[in-house]
Image (cartoon, grey):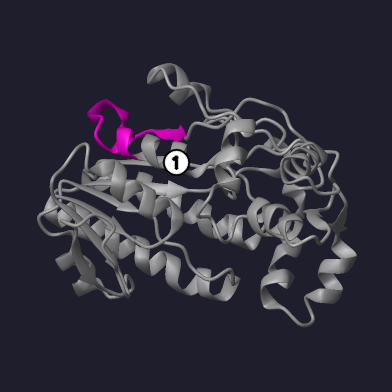
Amino acid sequence: MQTILGSGGAVANHLAIELKKYSSKIRLVSRQPKKINETDEIFPADLTNKELVSKAVKGSEVVYLTAGLPYNIKIWQRDWPVIMQNVIEACVEHNARLVFFDNVYAYSPDEVSHMTENSQKNPSTRKGKVRADLLNMIFDAIKEKGLQALIARSADFYGKDVKTGFLNFGVIDKLKKGSKAMWQSDADKIHSLTYVPDAAKAVAILGNTLDAYNQEWHLPTSSQKWTGKDFINHIAQQLNAKPKYYLLNKTMIRLLGIFSTTIRELKEMQYQNDRNYFFDSTKFDKRFSFTPTSYEEGIKESLM
């Protein structure tokens, strides 16, 4: 049995398909889980409920924590530590290996221009500190409780079924509608993006590779150094649209944040957009002889 905690998102849905290569039994866990494969087992659960998490994990060989919470720091601070503690305890109790789908928030702002698995964890933001604390919980459990776990880390991601990725809603969706594209802070800076199907394949590979555990892994991401303008120009060309765009800068975020909590929450994260943001997946690519999907191909698939 392989279990996805936090099913229903773009990455989790692709992961459910990939896991069929490794197991005939897939369990999908969320508040309102829906089958992806015909044979999937669905298990409704709130991951903040310790008893339900234990029941959801029972019988699992590998557990994938892919849950996403609303983009609100108060919810993150309240719920993420509880969820992680519940998952760690359940995995230890039932002798299940843990794969945590992570982002780059824990890295120091000084590391963003070239991130590797060895980049320094020294977050400057509240959300980054929450993520760093989760990583510490996992590695403390590895040392003290015998947990087998790994970190599968992604850059900002995109893909055909991604609704929340800024390339999708800020560029693709807007240009399709004939509107100006939106980019954050500085469109002249490099910004790596991970293609969701690649991420899902890689997470499944890692979860089923015993010697990958107790390590951090960057999921396969194109090494092309495209800027915001490169993405906008290429997508506009594919759509036969004009590559017009506006910048969502700190001033706009402050003003629009009066009316939108989500936009207000973006303010502290702009260090990821006002400088080059390059995500290096060399470790995974070499270990598993994996060639990440190019931006040209990934965007082509995303536009279909």
Q: Position of residue 224 (x, y in %)?
A: 67, 26
Q: Position of residue 122 (x, y in %)?
A: 62, 45
Q: Look at the picture and state if 226 lies above or below 30.
A: above
Q: Position of residue 251 (x, y in %)?
A: 90, 66
Q: Residue at x 60, y 39 (%)?
A: 300
Q: Quadrant of residue 246?
A: bottom right
Q: Look at the picture and state if 281 lies above or below 51.
A: above
Q: Quadrant of residue 177?
A: bottom right
Q: Which residue is mark 1?
A: 197
168 and 248: which one is in front? Answer: 168
Q: Residue at x 76, y 82 (%)?
A: 259
In the picture, measured across the screen, residue 233 lies left or right of residue 80, that is: right
Q: Residue at x 80, y 55 (%)?
A: 181
Residue furthest left in the image: 59
Residue 124 visible within the image: no
Is 205 included in the stretch rendered in magenta?
A: yes
Q: Magenta residues?
A: 204-218
Residue furthest front in the image: 240
Residue 134 visible within the image: yes
Tally of numbered tags: 1
Which amino acid is tagged 1? Answer: Pro
